[in-house]
Amino acid sequence: MMYQRMKDIFEKVYGESEGVRVFFAPGRVNLIGEHTDYNGGHVFPCALTLGTYAAVRERDDGLIRMYSENVTGGLVVERESGDYKIYNRKLWSNYPYGVIWALDEQGKKLNCGYDIAYYGNIPGGAGLSSSASIEVLTAYMFNELCGFGLSLTDMALLCQYSENNYNRMNCGIMDQFASAMGRENMAIFLDTATLEYEYAPIELTDKVILIINSNVKHSLGSSKYNERRMESEAAFNSLKEELDIRTLGDLDEAEFDKYQHLIKDPVERKRAKHAVYENRRTINAYNALKRGDIEEFGRLMLESHMSLRDDYQVSCKEIDRIVELGMNCDGVYGIRITGGGFGGCCVSIVDEDKKDDIISYIGSEYRKSVGYDADFYTVLAGGGPAEVKG
Ligand code: GLA
């Protein structure tokens, strides 16, 4: 189905579609472990069945042409290969071009020009990693087309590098890793200090993962995100003067409490507290899921939200309203902001048979509070990047 759909989009833009190949990479939702990935902590995301698709075909010159079905007006962005100048910081195509640039930096040159049509079914700006999915898709596709021999972990690191250095978003490794390593019905428990990971089955039986999109776009997100990252680093540097640690993730709660006075700035102290406590919560949540203790998992999700709201300060009033409404509902085990923050989505675990009531309650109360609608998606954990066959 998606193969045909992508072929049709390609044909509409480039005339005909003989010989196109279609590829996919997923978005992700993070269950718990937020803003820990650049602090040497753990994260616990899963890839989604939603993601980004590309139809691609070689050209016999050096031109790279890209089109996105998601951008209104759908212009084809066209470049000579090797031209990596950023003409407009806001262009979506900076994500895939960044990946081609990063490949080139590693001496992996595309062997010809390409026509590409992208289409994604993840809501953009919602904290579900539409950008990481475009990046991983682009890396995976060229790895297949040009035989670069990169592993999935190599691709995740390359995509993070391009986002950090080409797009100037100083993100951690979580999103690209989750997209590259996704596995059906599994969440990924990743230690970002070592990149060691384990898959944990998401066995929710009569419960489901419900995502609630506040429809507040996290447009100021990247500058605020970079600011949080600097604050955490400053806190770490203050602790490191006296303690033998490599990252904030090396500390447990008791050690942090004992040494927190070393961080003089109260804001930086709060940021570090979140990073340390959130890391421990993530480890505990992983163990709770393994035991099938969803009540405990939910409780930790809620604690995570409070910490992101009060100590890390990456929530916003609309998201806090959704969490508050969720907490009033029977059948909600846990609910929290997910992703980079400053808008976007909440992730929750809810009883399947109460889901419709929960959606209608949160939906109508949210509309009364903010004057516009939230969107709701029940999601499944999906696999990683792949070629889509016809
Ligand atoms: C964004 C970044 C990730 C991670 C999260 C917060 O999604 O891309 O690396 O830091 O925010 O957990």
Image (spheres, helix red, strand yellow):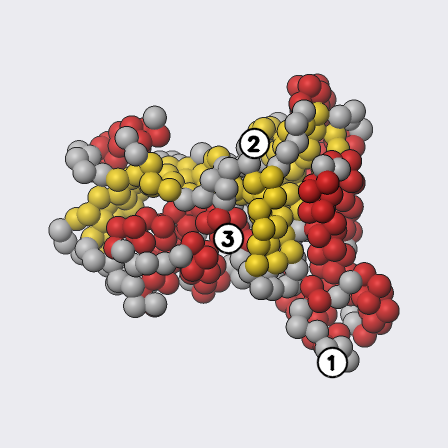
Q: Earlier in the sequence, mark 1 or mark 3?
A: 3
User: Which residue reaches farthest left?
Assistant: 60
Calculate the distance from the C-alpha at mark 1 to the C-alpha at mark 3.
Answer: 31 Å
- The x and y percentages for residue 179 are 48, 47
Q: Secondary structure at mark 2?
A: strand
The residue pinned by badge 1 equals 241
Is residue 316 among what the camera can see?
no
For the point 26% across and 40% down, which residue is it?
21
Q: Secondary structure at mark 3?
A: helix
Q: Are marks 1 and 3 in contact (CB under 8 Å)?
A: no
Q: Is mark 3 within 8 Å of ligand 1?
A: no
Q: Nearer the viewer, mark 1 or mark 3?
A: 3
Q: Are marks 2 and 3 in contact (CB under 8 Å)?
A: no
The residue pinned by badge 2 equals 379
User: Which residue reaches farthest front?
Assistant: 291
Calculate the distance from the C-alpha at mark 1 to the C-alpha at mark 2.
Answer: 44 Å
